Amino acid sequence: MRLVSAVITTLLLSANAFTASATCLDANALQKLGNNETEYLLGRIPPAFPDAVADKKIQFKMHDAEADTCQAKLEVTLPENDVREANLLLAADPAKKIILFSQGYALPETTALNAIFTVDPVSLQISHADTLQSGALGKLRASIEMMYAMLTQQRANIDEKTQNNEPWSAEFRQRQTAKCSSQFAATQQAEAGCECQISKTSAIASERQMRYIEYVDSNPYAQATGANKNFAAVKSQIQLACGLNKAGR
């Protein structure tokens, strides 16, 4: 009986160990892990990326890659047009391509990207080594970020010939009006001037393009590319035409 009991105990322990291994990352954990990674990318990558996600042009899938070592696999499918556009932009700037590649950066060359990485099954924290630029997930993140930084900068390049046929939402218009009013509070007839500026600006730039411009304006590295210089010139012309002068001048 003792031998039978010992054998049964051993089998139960083995079965429990197998079950724990097989369910290292169950469906709920994988979903949460996928949501965490998506939120991380949305919070980090320039606005052309979250816009593509909102348009459902980018798909994310999280799989259980290896139960024994608790590894997960992230698959990301990117829009073919975005991949092509980014690579054409970089090909047109060989010096930039050489610099970026020498620093370990590379653009996606296909629409399908994937990375396998180790996960803590309790906290769902990803192994630090995998998030480094030399790690699989780190490379994937950096590649997508570089691609959409370039696309955001390119799409922020607006001049006086650009036309916008997408009306601004009431909420976005209100935010832009408040921003203008704050900037030109000391200007005579600021209210009329700001309304004039909003009208003229919305005729050449969509809400998304304005977000791209604001991103470039707020990022010194993006500013250095000169992506905002055309719009900056147009904006100055609009302000002059609308009778707006900076407060205190």
Image (spheres, rainbow, N blue to C red):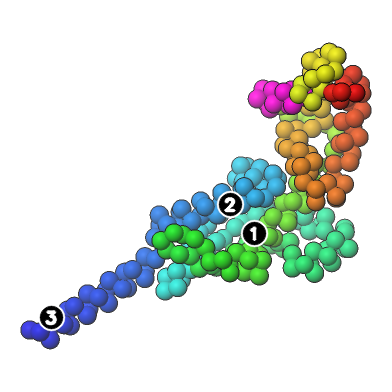
Q: Which residue is mark 3?
A: 5
- Residue nearest the viewer, comparing 171 with 204: 171
Residue located farthest toward the left when viewing the structure as drawn: 1
On the image, the x and y values in percent for residue 43 come to 62, 47
Left or right: where 209 falls relative to 162: left
User: Which element is circle 2 on?
Assistant: helix
Separation of marks 2 and 3 at Cα, in angstroms: 50 Å
Q: Residues within 10 Å of mark 3 (few under 14, many from 20)?
A: few
Left or right: where 125 falls relative to 172: left
User: Which element is circle 1 on?
Assistant: helix
For the point 63% across and 66% down, the residue is 132
Q: Which residue is mark 1?
A: 141
Q: Given the image, on which type of amino acid does mark 1 rest?
A: Arg
On the image, the x and y values in percent for residue 137 come to 60, 64
Q: Which residue is mark 2?
A: 40
Circles 2 and 1, Cβ within 8 Å, touching? The answer is yes
Residues drawn in magenta: 169-180
